[in-house]
C-alpha cells in the first residue's frame, strides 16, 4: 500500500511539473508571436528539458530556433532546427517536418557556407507536398521556394519555381492567383534583371487580370510597379503618369502612410525629370503627411501604454484563475489516483490467488525444461564421445599399427638387399610381398585419416551431412532436411572436413538454443565457391551478442570460415528464426 501511495505521489508531482513546463512553453510562444524574441528565449531558458515529453521537447527546440531565426542569428538556429526535425519525425508529425525543411533551406541559404547544402531540404519539402495530392498547397510550396530564391544571384531558380506554381494555377483557373504570379515575374525582371521591358509586359498582363475581377488595391499596386520600371528606364513622364493613376485610386479610407509613401516617390521622380516646382510641391505634401503620422504615433504610443496596463491587469487575473483551476484539477487527479491505488490493492490480492494456481503449472514446465536440458546434454555427450573415439582409433592406427608396418617394410627391404643371388621366382616373391606391404600401409593411413575427420571420406560431404541430419532428427521433435544443388565435384579433403564440422556445430546450436522444430541445410556449388545456408524456425536471437558473448560458438565458426577466405552473414530477429549463410572458396 505504501508503494502504491508513493507511486501516486510521484505521478501527481509529475503532472504538476509537466503543467509548469507547458505553461512556460506557451508563454515563450506568445512572446515570440509578439516579436519579443529575447523575452521568449529567457522563458525557454527556465524550461527543464528533462521533464519534457517528446512533443514538448520538439516544440522547445523549434521555439528556440524560431527566435534565433527572427533575430537573423541563422548559425544558432540551424542545429536547433535539426533537433526539432528529428523529434517531430519520431512522433510522425510530417506536416511540421515539412515546415522545418523549408526553414532549414532558408537558414542554410542565409548562412551561405560551402559545407552546408540546402538542396536536400527543398527535395524533402516538395516530396511531402507532392505526396499530399493537394494542388493548392503544392503551388504555395513552389511560391515559397521561389520567394526565397528572389535574389540577383539565384533569380533563375526563382523563375523556375514560380513557373511551376503558375502551371498549377492555370489548371485551377484562379484569376487572382494568376495575376499575382504575373506580377511576381514583373518584379523579378524589374529588380534583378536588365530586362525592364519584360517587367512592363508582365505588369500590364497582371493589371488586365486585376481589372477583370475589380481588385482596386492590386490595380494600384500594378501602377506603382509600372511606374518603378519606367523610372529605371529613365522615362520619367511615363513613371509620373502611372504614379498619378495610382494616386487616383487612393480614397479617403487609405492610410496616411500610403499617401506619404506615394508622394515621396512622385517628388523624387519629378526631381529626376528636372521639374523642381512639382518636386517641391510633392515634398511639401510628403512632409505634411509625415507630421500628421508623427502626431498619430505619439497618440498611439500613449494608447499602447494604457492598453498594455489593461492587458497586464487582465493577464494577472487570468493567471490567478488558472492557478485556482489548476489546484482544483490537481485535487481531482489525486483523488482519482487514490481510487486507482485502492483498486490495485484489491487486484493484487486476487492476483496472489491466481499465482498460487499457476505455481503448479510452472513447476511442471520446469520439470519439462530439465528433461529437455538432459536430452541436449546427452546429445552433446554423444557427439563428444564419437569425436574422442574417432581420435583414439585414428591415433592407434597411425601410431601403433602404422609404425609396425613401416618397420616391417624396412626389415624386409634390408633382407632383400643382403641377398645377392636370388632365383627369378624368389625375386618375384619379394616384389609381390613388398607391393602388399605398401598397399596395407596406405590403407591403414587412409582409414586413420577418415576416422579422424568425423566424416566418411569415401562417401563425401553431402552424404555425411545427410547421415548426421538423419541421426539428429530422431527423438528430438526436430526435422533436419539437407538439400544439395550441383554438388557433384568433390572438394579438397580438409575443406570438406571443415564444412562438415561447421554444419555439425550450427545444427547443434539450433538444438541447444533455438527451440526449433525444423532445420533446412542448403548446399550449393557455384563456379568458384560453395554456398551453405542453414535455416531454422526457432525463436531467433540478437546477432550483436556475438561480439561480446561466444556462448553459441558462432565467433569460432566465423573465424574458421574467414581462415578459409570466406565470409559469414547472420540474419536473425526475435521470434522469426535464424538464417546463417556461409560462402567458402573452392580453393
Image (cartoon, rainbow, N blue to C red):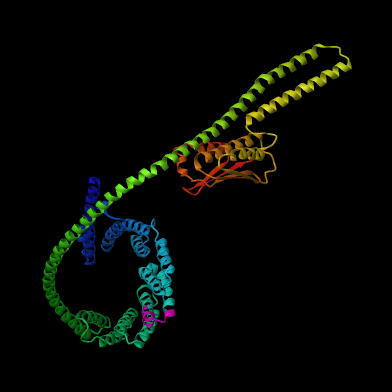
Displayed quadrant of residue 324: bottom left
Q: Is residue 109 left or right of residue 298?
A: right
Q: Is residue 581 above or below residue 184?
A: above
Q: Is residue 344 visible?
A: yes
Q: Which one is nearer the viewer's eye here, 2 or 301?
A: 2
Image-quadrant location for residue 428: top right
In the rendered structure, the answer to whether residue 156 lies left or right of residue 412 reads: left
Residue at 80% from the left image edge and 14% from the top image edge: 416
Q: Residue 450: x and y, percent?
A: 66, 30
Tell me if residue 379 is in the magenta stretch: no
Instruction: Tell me if I can see residue 47 in this picture.
Output: no
Image coordinates for residue 549, horizontal then vertical, percent: 45, 37
Q: Is residue 227 left or right of residue 284?
A: right
The count of marks equals 0
Residue 134 in the image: state x and y as whole percent. 41, 72
> Which of the two residues, 150 or 503, is positioned nearer the viewer here?
503
Q: Which residues are magenta?
A: 170-180
Q: Is residue 335 left or right of residue 488?
A: left
Measured from the top left, where is residue 104 in percent x and y? 35, 61
Characterize the magenta stretch by its predominant secondary structure: helix
Amino acid at each position: 500500500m505504501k508503494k502504491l501511495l508513493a507511486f501516486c505521489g510521484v505521478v501527481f508531482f509529475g503532472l504538476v511539473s509537466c503543467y509548469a513546463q507547458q505553461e512556460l512553453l506557451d508563454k515563450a510562444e506568445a512572446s515570440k508571436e509578439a516579436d519579443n524574441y529575447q523575452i521568449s528565449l529567457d522563458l525557454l531558458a527556465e524550461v527543464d528539458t528533462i521533464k519534457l515529453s517528446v512533443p514538448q521537447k520538439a516544440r522547445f527546440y523549434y521555439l528556440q530556433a524560431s527566435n534565433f531565426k527572427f533575430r537573423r542569428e541563422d548559425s544558432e538556429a540551424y542545429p536547433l532546427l535539426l533537433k526539432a526535425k528529428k523529434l517531430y519525425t519520431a512522433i510522425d508529425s510530417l506536416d511540421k517536418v515539412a515546415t522545418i525543411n523549408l526553414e532549414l533551406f532558408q537558414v542554410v541559404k542565409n548562412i551561405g557556407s560551402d559545407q552546408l547544402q540546402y538542396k536536400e531540404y527543398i527535395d524533402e519539402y516538395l516530396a511531402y507536398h507532392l505526396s499530399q495530392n493537394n494542388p493548392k498547397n503544392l503551388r504555395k510550396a513552389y511560391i515559397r521556394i521561389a520567394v526565397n530564391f528572389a535574389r540577383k544571384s539565384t533569380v533563375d531558380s526563382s523563375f523556375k519555381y514560380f513557373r511551376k506554381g503558375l502551371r498549377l494555377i492555370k489548371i485551377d483557373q484562379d484569376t487572382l492567383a494568376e495575376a499575382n504570379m504575373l506580377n511576381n515575374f514583373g518584379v523579378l525582371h524589374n529588380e534583378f534583371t536588365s530586362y525592364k521591358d519584360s517587367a512592363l509586359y508582365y505588369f500590364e498582363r497582371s493589371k488586365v487580370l486585376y481589372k477583370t475581377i475589380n481588385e482596386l488595391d492590386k490595380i494600384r499596386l500594378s501602377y506603382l510597379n509600372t511606374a518603378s520600371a519606367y523610372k529605371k528606364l529613365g522615362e520619367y513622364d511615363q513613371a509620373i503618369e502611372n504614379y498619378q493613376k495610382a494616386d487616383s485610386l487612393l480614397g479617403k479610407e487609405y492610410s496616411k502612410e500610403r499617401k506619404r509613401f506615394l508622394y515621396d516617390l512622385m517628388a523624387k521622380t519629378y526631381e529626376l525629370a528636372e521639374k523642381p516646382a512639382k518636386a517641391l510641391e510633392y515634398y511639401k505634401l510628403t512632409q505634411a503627411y509625415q507630421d500628421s503620422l508623427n502626431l498619430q504615433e505619439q497618440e498611439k504610443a500613449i494608447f499602447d501604454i494604457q492598453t498594455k496596463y489593461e492587458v497586464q491587469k487582465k493577464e494577472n487575473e487570468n493567471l490567478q484563475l488558472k492557478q485556482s483551476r489548476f489546484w482544483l484539477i490537481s485535487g481531482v487527479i489525486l483523488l482519482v489516483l487514490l481510487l486507482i491505488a485502492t483498486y490495485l490493492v484489491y487486484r493484487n490480492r486476487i492476483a496472489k490467488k491466481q499465482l498460487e494456481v499457476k505455481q503448479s503449472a510452472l513447476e511442471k514446465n520446469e520439470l519439462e525444461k530439465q528433461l529437455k536440458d538432459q536430452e541436449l546434454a546427452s546429445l552433446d555427450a554423444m557427439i563428444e564421445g564419437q569425436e574422442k573415439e574417432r581420435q583414439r582409433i585414428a591415433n592407434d592406427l597411425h601410431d601403433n599399427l602404422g609404425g609396425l608396418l613401416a618397420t616391417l617394410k624396412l626389415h624386409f627391404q634390408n633382407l632383400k638387399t643382403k641377398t645377392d643371388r636370388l632365383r627369378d621366382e624368389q625375386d618375384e616373391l619379394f616384389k609381390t610381398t613388398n607391393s602388399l606391404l605398401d598397399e596395407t600401409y596406405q590403407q591403414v593411413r587412409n582409414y586413420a585419416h577418415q576416422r579422424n575427420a568425423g566424416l566418411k571420406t569415401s562417401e563425401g560431404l553431402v552424404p555425411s551431412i545427410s547421415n548426421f541430419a538423419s541421426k539428429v532428427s530422431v527423438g528430438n521433435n526436430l526435422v533436419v532436411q539437407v538439400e544439395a544443388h550441383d554438388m557433384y565435384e568433390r572438394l579438397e579433403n580438409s575443406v570438406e572436413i571443415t564444412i562438415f564440422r561447421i554444419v555439425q556445430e550450427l545444427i547443434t546450436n539450433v538444438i541447444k538454443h533455438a527451440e526449433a522444430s525444423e532445420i533446412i541445410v542448403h548446399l550449393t556449388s557455384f563456379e568458384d565457391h560453395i554456398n551453405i545456408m542453414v535455416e531454422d524456425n526457432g525463436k531467433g536471437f540478437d546477432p550483436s551478442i556475438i561480439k561480446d558473448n561466444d556462448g553459441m560458438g558462432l565467433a569460432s565458426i566465423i573465424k574458421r570460415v574467414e581462415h578459409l577466405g570466406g565470409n559469414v552473414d547472420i540474419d536473425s530477429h526475435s521470434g522469426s528464426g535464424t538464417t546463417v549463410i556461409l560462402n567458402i572458396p573452392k580453393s
